[in-house]
Amino acid sequence: MGSRRLDSREEEINNAPKEAWVKLDFKLIDWSYMDFSSTFRVDTSVHTIKEVIKKWHGGKIATLTVCKGSYQEMNELRHDQLTLEKCGIKGVSDKDNAPAVTLYYDFKIDGCSEPDPILLC
């Protein structure tokens, strides 16, 4: 028996991109006790990532800044509709061996315009 030729539909299925995963290490810039990690697909939006951070802190966040690699303005993930992949974060198909990427973040608490003197001690 000879080898059969793949039809265009089978080729499309075989060449379809596989799910790609990345492990995100979240680091609050001024308090390491709140650091955490989680694994996401690279097609996850920046908005979803920000919602995860807000939930981690109880949802009382007014403004949130997230940066990739280091906490600098040029590394800020500003566009909530973009995916992690479109922000330059690459993943792998093996979720258990997903590469780690560090996201640094800072926020202002909702309803708190002045720094809390107790927290500054």
Image (cartoon, rainbow, N blue to C red):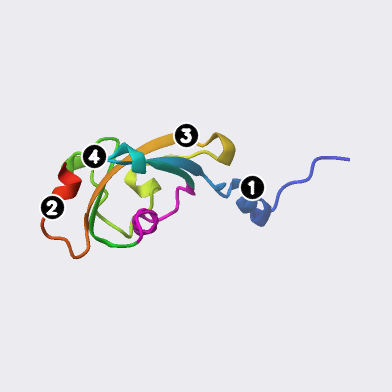
Q: Earlier in the sequence, mark 4 or mark 2?
A: 4
Secondary structure under badge 4?
loop
Q: Amino acid at mark 1?
A: Asn
Report the residue marked by disc 3. 99
Q: Position of residue 114 (x, y in %)?
A: 10, 56
Residue 35 relative to residue 42: left or right:
left
Q: Nearer the viewer, mark 4 or mark 1?
A: 4
Report the residue marked by disc 4. 30
Neighbours of disc 3 within 10 Å: few (<14), some (14-19), many (20+): some
Q: Quadrant of residue 81?
A: bottom left
Report the residue marked by disc 1. 14
> Badges 4 and 2: C-beta atoms under 8 Å apart?
no
Measure the alpha-carbon separation of dots 3 and 4: 24 Å
Neighbours of disc 4 within 10 Å: few (<14), some (14-19), many (20+): few
Q: Amino acid at mark 2?
A: Pro
> Badges 2 and 1: C-beta atoms under 8 Å apart?
no
Neighbours of disc 2 within 10 Å: few (<14), some (14-19), many (20+): few
Measure the alpha-carbon separation of dots 4 and 1: 46 Å
Q: Earlier in the sequence, mark 3 or mark 2?
A: 3
Measure the alpha-carbon separation of dots 2 and 1: 55 Å
Q: Earlier in the sequence, mark 4 or mark 1?
A: 1
Q: Amino acid at mark 4?
A: Asp
